[in-house]
Image (spheres, rainbow, N blue to C red):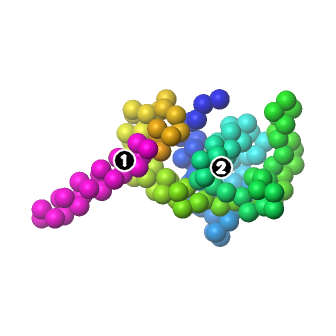
Amino acid sequence: MRVNPEYLKGLLEAFELAEKPYTYISELERHGYSYKDHECIFHLDILCDKGLIESKSEDGSLGFSYSPSEGVEKSFQLAPLRLTADGHDFIANLNEKDVWHQIKENFQESGFDTIKSVAADLAMGYAKKKVGALLAA
């Protein structure tokens, strides 16, 4: 399975829609991201691996049980999940119109680390360009 930048962005946006500091698998499901879907599990695991989301459950799990041979189980716990500071920075970078356009046009097939790095570099580049324009005015 490959990282899908569109799916990843939407999942991060679902985290941003949380009304409280933490969200739950059930709340993500209301936004169209079901723990029963392998793509959702894959992207949640990637975000967790990269430190962009974290669980506040006692065992550190994301709140669902999963067996690679059987697929996603039909049960989940109410494990509190949160976007980390890096997660908030990453989605803020992706939400920059010009950044997201460039990611979609030129980096759709890239790996996660490349997408994250490019998003940060582009956001910083565009910010420096804006600052330069403001200082020149």
- Residue 18, position as x, y percentages in the image: 63, 64
- Residue 9, position as x, y percentages in the image: 54, 47
Q: Which residue is mark 1?
A: 121
Toward the viewer: 84 or 43? 84
Toward the viewer: 124 or 72? 124
Quadrant assignment for the C terminus: bottom left
Are the residues tagged 2 and 1 within 8 Å (C-beta)? Answer: no
Instruction: Name which residue type carries label 2.
Output: Cys
Left or right for 33, reference 116: right
Residue in view at x 45 percent, y 49 percent? 94
Q: Main secondary structure of the magenta part?
A: helix
Q: Which residues are magenta?
A: 117-137
Based on the displayed image, in which of its 4 quarters is residue 73 positioned? top right
- For marks 2 and 1, the one nearer the N-term is 2
Instruction: Please determine whether, in this image, residue 76 is positioned above or below residue 131.
Output: above
| Residue 95 image label | none
Instruction: Please determine whether, in this image, residue 30 is positioned above or below residue 35.
Output: below
Crowd class of label 1 (few under 14; some 14 to 19; many from 20; radius 10 Å): some
- Residue 125, position as x, y percentages in the image: 30, 50
What is the secondary structure assignment of the residue under circle 1? helix
Left or right for 84, reference 74: left
Left or right for 23, reference 114: right
Residue in view at x 63 percent, y 55 percent? 53
Report how far apart the C-alphas of labels 2 and 1 lie in the structure: 22 Å
What is the secondary structure assignment of the residue under circle 2? helix
Residue 128 located within the stretch drawn in magenta? yes
Quadrant assignment for the N terminus: top right
Toward the viewer: 122 or 36? 122
- Residue 92, position as x, y percentages in the image: 46, 56
| Residue 48 image label | 2
Residue in view at x 57 percent, y 44 percent? 8
